[in-house]
Image: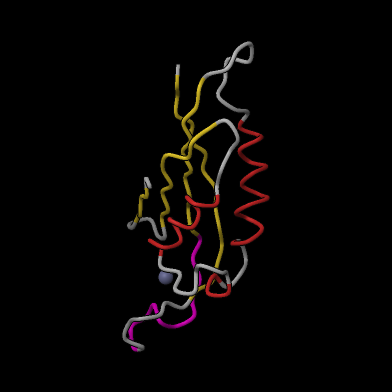
Amino acid sequence: MKMELSRHYTLQSARALKGIDEEHQCARLHGHTFQVRVSVLGEVKMPEGWVVDFAEMDQIWEETIKVKLDHVLLNDVPGLENPTTELLTKWIFEHYQVPGTTTVAVDVNETGYSRVRYTG
Ligand SMILES: [Zn+2]
């Protein structure tokens, strides 16, 4: 039996978008509190009765995503030279891997009104 697990996290990061009119407000240095949801799919294992311990998801988030993206200038991160929310979402999708599961979706809200979803 396969099931999908999701976990929510927050990233506080700065960015200045490239490739747009320099008068655009997003071209100026600014910050966001990104709301991130990562979703993984895996087999429910016995005797635990779970796919993976949520604490393990948290540990992997801290070690592979938060340490690189939280309280940083995203433009300085390799692969995020132009850190639009679309490219940030894809970056997280490609770097978040929990053993024994498949990452099936990453959702990133940059505000309460805007969300990007990537499913690979
Ligand atoms: Zn922005």
Image point (43%, 56%), residue name: 90
Q: Nearer the viewer, residue 27 or 82?
A: 82
Name the spot of residue 118 as percent of width and height, x first.
37, 50
Q: Nearer the viewer, residue 5 or 115?
A: 5
Image point (41%, 55%), residue name: 109
**Quadrant that contains the N terminus:** top left
From this view, report whether residue 58 is shown above or below residue 62: above
Residue 111 on the magenta segment = no
Q: How many marks?
A: 0
Outermost residue toward the top? 47
Name the spot of residue 113 as percent of width and height, x first.
33, 57
Left or right: 54, with 109 as reference point: right
Magenta region, residue range: 23-33
Name the spot of residue 103 as percent of width and height, x first.
47, 40
Name the spot of residue 10 as percent of width and height, x first.
54, 53
Quadrant housing residue 70: bottom right
From this view, report whether residue 77 is shown above or below residue 11: below
From this view, report whether residue 5 is shown above or below residue 17: above
Residue 32 on the magenta segment = yes
What colour scheme was applied to this rendering of the protein?
A: secondary structure
Left or right: 93, with 100 as reference point: left
Q: Quadrant of ligand 1?
A: bottom left
Image point (31%, 86%), residue name: 21
Image point (42%, 63%), residue name: 87
